[in-house]
């Protein structure tokens, strides 16, 4: 049973011999405590905006680190505490998991919570415990100013309580000015939203072409950003298993401790979790941990979305993002792990976070999205038809341009895929782009100065490779020209209402 009570009200005296509650008794000192919690965040509250609580807390002179991120399960821990090591530094696991949310911003104290908790027990006629009552006063300060004070009463039965006794407790607490609640506010709710508290990684809604153009673009970018951050966190958290602050987790993660002190599990931010004395280690944070294959796939999907929306977005922003994307996509996953991602990757995340809040459009974002999207797809299809109709197997002219236009049109259609017809157009354009992929552009081969440095055997091998390459290009072009009329008809049928 949970109650919120006035800060200055007297402690509740829940004694009623007629109902079997003979007296109250204080629990041991270990069950009553004072705690000081320092919440850590960037100056612009990036962790709080993302739904991540990171804190350092001291309970009766025992310190530990704490993280709680229920919105990011299963990648980030929920209600997890880790003991301080000898250096008192932030655990490597916590530092690693918060990196994509902070994106280079330094951590600093953002708020403080002070909790004074006293616990008593309700005893029956024979001295048997009936229930535990925790009376907690919580004060939250930010920049030296108290922003909230709360008093919470928690009654936890230790045996089956009769409904009559439960009703009497509720009536008694209400008579003292308390209010019964289903749950207490979380640490995030106590702090309240920071200024301009739009989330950094919002969940995308259902694609709706009937929305405004700005809303549609925002939703597409938000969906891609969410895929990227989830792939990132999946790589970082693999093998961590930070599900709780229990001794079992800490033993499995850090190895055999020298001693484990018996205390309570971390039921909330103000309470103390299992506090082992352990030797900290690098754990799983080495060059082999955190493969980026899935992350590169998500970034490749993002590149397709950006290419498709390029006509609607500011060209300079598209160029800068594309450069960063290309740099990350060129990383070798066999050598680069999630712990060695370049700084450009975090700049890319920053650009996307800002764009999701306010995309840099070159058109009026308030107009309905559907007419604009339909016009863009039809224009792209017209360009593909015009260029492909002119292709000739006997010349290199036009093949490279047709291939680039088909790839751009396919990316556009895939990005704007909002109904069955749009999906059909996207599939037809993807087919055309695939057929053009192997048609080449110019006859590439070694430069004369390169040939001069080759041995006769190496020059002969290079010539054979070029010969096979040209033969493959010729076959691909013949195949495309042969099948183009049929593909053209299917594409026209798909795009025609």
Image (cartoon, rainbow, N blue to C red):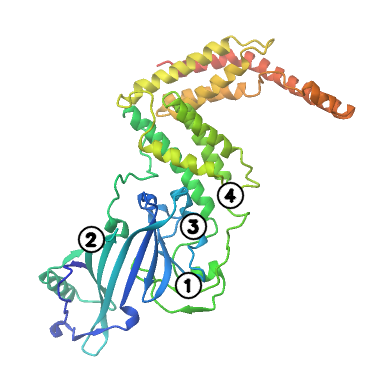
Q: CA distance from mark 3 to mark 4?
A: 14 Å
Residue bearing the label numbered 3 = 95
Label whose residue precedes the other's in the sequence (2 or 3): 3
- List x then y, in percent, for residue 373: 39, 23
Q: Quadrant of residue 286?
A: bottom right
Residue bearing the label numbered 4 = 340
Label whose residue precedes the other's in the sequence (1 or 3): 3
Marks 1, 4: nearer the viewer = 4
Label whose residue precedes the other's in the sequence (3 or 4): 3
On the rendered structure, is 109 left or right of 142? right
Q: CA distance from mark 1 to mark 3?
A: 21 Å
Q: Residues within 10 Å of mark 2 (few under 14, many from 20)?
A: some
Question: Furthest-front residue in view?
Answer: 144
Are dots 3 and 4 in contact, CB under 8 Å?
no
Please give the label number shown on residue 163: none
Q: Residues within 10 Å of mark 1 (few under 14, many from 20)?
A: some
Q: Eyeballing the image, is 54 above or below 274?
A: above
- List x then y, in percent, for residue 452: 84, 24
Count of labels shown?
4
Q: Residues within 10 Å of mark 3 (few under 14, many from 20)?
A: few
């Amino acid at each position: 049973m949970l109650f919120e009570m006035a800060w200055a009200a007297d402690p509740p005296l829940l004694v009623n011999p007629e109902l079997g509650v003979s007296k109250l008794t204080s629990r041991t000192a270990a069950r009553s405590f004072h705690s000081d919690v320092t919440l850590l965040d960037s100056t612009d509250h990036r962790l709080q905006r993302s739904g991540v609580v990171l804190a350092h807390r001291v309970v009766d002179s025992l310190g530990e680190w704490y993280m709680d991120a229920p919105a990011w399960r299963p990648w980030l821990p929920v209600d997890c505490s880790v003991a301080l090591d000898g250096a008192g530094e932030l655990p490597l696991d916590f530092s690693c998991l918060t990196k994509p949310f902070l994106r280079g911003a330094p951590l600093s104290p953002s708020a403080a919570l002070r909790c004074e908790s006293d616990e008593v027990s309700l005893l029956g006629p024979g001295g048997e415990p009936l229930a535990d009552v925790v009376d907690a006063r919580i004060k939250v300060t930010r920049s030296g100013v108290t922003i909230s004070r709360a008093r919470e009463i928690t009654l936890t039965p230790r045996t089956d309580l009769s409904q009559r006794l439960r009703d009497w407790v509720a009536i008694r607490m209400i008579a003292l000015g308390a209010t019964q609640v289903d749950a207490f506010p979380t640490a995030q709710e106590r702090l309240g939203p920071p200024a301009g508290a739009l989330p950094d990684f919002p969940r995308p809604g259902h694609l709706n072409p009937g929305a405004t153009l700005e809303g549609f673009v925002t939703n597409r970018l938000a969906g891609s950003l969410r895929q990227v951050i989830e792939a990132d966190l999946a790589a970082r958290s693999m093998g961590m298993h930070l599900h709780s602050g229990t001794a079992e987790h800490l033993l499995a993660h850090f190895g055999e401790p020298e001693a484990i002190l018996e205390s309570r599990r971390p039921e909330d931010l103000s309470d103390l979790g299992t506090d082992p004395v352990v030797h900290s280690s690098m754990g799983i944070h080495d060059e082999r941990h955190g493969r980026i294959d899935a992350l590169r796939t998500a970034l490749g999907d993002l590149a397709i979305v950006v290419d498709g929306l390029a006509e609607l977005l500011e060209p300079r922003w598209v160029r800068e993002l594309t450069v960063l994307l290309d740099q990350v996509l060129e990383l070798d996953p066999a050598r680069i792990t999630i712990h060695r991602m370049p700084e450009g990757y975090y700049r890319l995340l920053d650009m996307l976070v800002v764009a999701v809040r306010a995309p840099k459009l070159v058109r009026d974002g308030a107009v309905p999205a559907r007419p604009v999207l339909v016009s863009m797809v039809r224009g792209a299809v017209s360009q593909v038809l015009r260029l492909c109709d002119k292709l000739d197997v006997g010349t290199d002219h036009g093949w490279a341009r047709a291939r680039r236009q088909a790839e751009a049109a396919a990316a556009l259609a895939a990005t704007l895929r909002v109904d069955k017809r749009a999906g059909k157009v996207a599939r037809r354009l993807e087919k055309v782009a695939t057929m053009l992929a192997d048609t080449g552009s110019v006859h590439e081969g070694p430069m004369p100065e390169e040939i001069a440095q080759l041995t006769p055997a190496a020059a002969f091998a290079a010539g054979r490779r070029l010969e096979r390459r040209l033969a493959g290009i010729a076959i691909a072009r013949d195949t495309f020209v042969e099948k183009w009329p049929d593909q053209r008809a299917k594409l026209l049928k798909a795009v025609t209402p």
